Amino acid sequence: ISGVHKNGWTYGAVFDGHGGWQVSDFASQKLLDIVFENFPVSAPNASMSHQVDSHIIRSYQLMEDMIVDNAREAFHMGFRDVAKVGTCSLLALKKDNRLIVANNGDCRAVLGSLVGGSIETATIINRDHNCRVPYEQVELSRQHPNEDNIVLCKSSRACYVKGRLQLTRSLGDAYL
């Protein structure tokens, strides 16, 4: 999804679903509306960074709450597998010289530089929220000190939250 919002921010978003298409589709229809509702419309500057960061975090939490509420309702109607559906997302917002990247999961944002019409460099500008990343393993253990096997690694490249999902952050996946 990409475009220019009425307040002048150019945006792009990627939703990478797993376990089904429902959460990815729902988030792709709603997340940008939630983010742009009450989004700071002044010219971007360094002093508004904390305000924007907090707003985007709240927006992701509102999106998650909507997804879980819908999943709970479907679950109680007998659609049990809906609790295993989720999505990674990557959101990029740009206005003037300001670039904001928000993600959950393991979608990657890459910033490239063009020289003479060819890409000279490409730099990953976000980090994976994946259980194979040592930082994520430490955070999971810190946040869940009394849970056995919060991280289960089958190899150095294949670690899972509770042995089930490699992602440490996603939208949906209510069963975890």
Image (spheres, grey):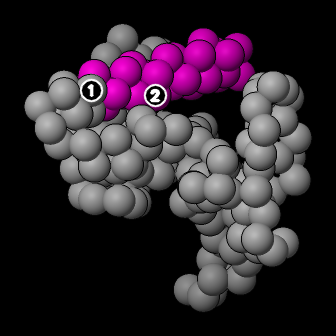
Nearer to the camera, 61 or 22: 22
What is the spatial separation of the Cα atoms under label 2 and label 1, in whole angstroms? Answer: 18 Å
**In the rendered view, would you say 11 is above or below 35?**
below
Q: Amino acid at mark 1?
A: Arg
The answer, for residue 55, to whether it is visible in the render is yes
Residue 72 is labelled as 1
Name the residue at 78% across, 38% down: 148
Residue sticking out furthest to the left:
77
Q: Is residue 167 magenta?
A: no
Counting residues from the N terminus, which is met first, the one under dot 2 or under dot 1? 2
Classify residue 58 as left or right of residue 147.
left
Name the residue at 84% across, 26% down: 145
Classify residue 45 as left or right of residue 69.
right
Residues shaded magenta = 43-69
Nearer to the camera, 133 or 150: 150
Q: Position of residue 90 (x, y in %)?
A: 49, 50
Nearer to the camera, 125 or 67: 67
The residue identified by callout 2 is 60
Classify residue 142 as left or right of residue 125.
right
Name the residue at 34% across, 27% down: 68
Q: Position of residue 98 (x, y in %)?
A: 60, 38
**In the rendered view, would you say 130 is above or below 140?**
below
